[in-house]
Amino acid sequence: KTEIKSNARDEGEVLFQKFLFEVLTPEDQQKLSYTWNKLYNAYSDIKHNIVPVGFEIPRKFKSGTLQLTPIQREGVAFFNLAGSGINAFDVGVGKTMTAIVALANAMYSGQCSRPLIVVPKPTYRKWIREIVGYEDSRTGKHIAGVLSGTGITINEFGNLGTKVKYSNKKVDPMTITVVTYEGFKKLGFSENVGEDMITELTNILGQSKNTDISARDKELNQKKIEGMIGYAQKDSVADIDTLGFDYICIDEAHRC
């Protein structure tokens, strides 16, 4: 019995192949082949290197010329087409540069106007410098960032501590907000969004096959959901939907 069971799949494959090619008529074989390929094989890889990408950035970056490598430009094209994704370039290939340029492309094409960047605290200042540049403390000269001179400015939210100046209303359009992981945890959502989440979670969890749930259990489930939403709001100081963010970029996303 054990041997029959272990060989059943292989034997089934052999018999199915015999059925396909010896029992079905040529016309049915053709129909089946067409349907199968249409459903499962009708895909070809997009050549992202020939997808057009066009927007304005400065000629200078830091002390040299701003140049995108072919693989970085291909990454920008991928994000432009897919709308979202994960950049898994190896160390030194230029994940940060690709992310900033993809973000600039999204802003320039009107896909977003109030993006949010979430970064680990040690790289916070580095991201801001790479985006809009900085003043050299020794020479006083402006060291260009990727978006220097484009009119795009930075909202430095940092850890969202007491020293950060922000108001709980929409941030200005064509500004990039940078926040650390610590600050990201302090971003909550408005009461309206919370109520929508409670309704949605209640509907999802209420799709259980157990139709005999008591009124008491329903009440307990409702309290549990409200507790989840409350926990998500814990220690929040600003509402992410009220601030109007419409795009998010997360550095070291596997840590988020």
Image: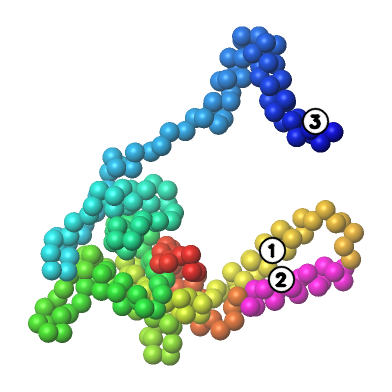
Residue 63 pos. (x, y %): 13, 68
Q: Can residue 109 be seen?
A: no
What amino acid type is highlighted by mark number 3? Ile
Q: Give the residue at mark 3.
A: 4
| Disc 1 secondary structure class | helix
Image check: 171 left or right of 71?
right
Q: Name the amino acid type tagged 1.
A: Leu
Q: Can you identify the residue that label 1 sits on? A: 201
Query: Would residue 93 be found to the left or right of residue 159 on screen?
Result: left
> Which dot, 1 or 3, sits closer to the camera?
3
Question: Is residue 246 placed above or below 155 in the rendered structure?
Answer: above
Of residues 112 and 101, the one nearer the viewer is 101
Mark nearer the N terminus (2 vs 3):
3
Based on the displayed image, in which of its 4 quarters is residue 6 positioned? top right
Picture residue at 42% right of the left edge, 52% below the top: 83
Residue at 21%, 68% in the rendered image: 145
Residue range corresponding to the magenta coloring:
215-231
- List x then y, in percent, for residue 158: 39, 81
Question: From the viewer's perspective, is 234 left or right of 95?
Answer: right
Amino acid of disc 2? Ile
Q: Label 1 neighbourhood size at 10 Å, few (<14), some (14-19), many (20+)?
A: some
**Real-space Cα separation, disc 1 to disc 3, in angstroms:** 46 Å
Instruction: Say which residue label 2 marks.
Output: 225
Of the two numbered discs 2 and 3 in the rendering, the one whose residue sits closer to the viewer:
3
**In the structure shown, which secondary structural element does the residue marked by tag 3 occupy?**
helix
Residue 188 highlighted magenta (yes or no): no
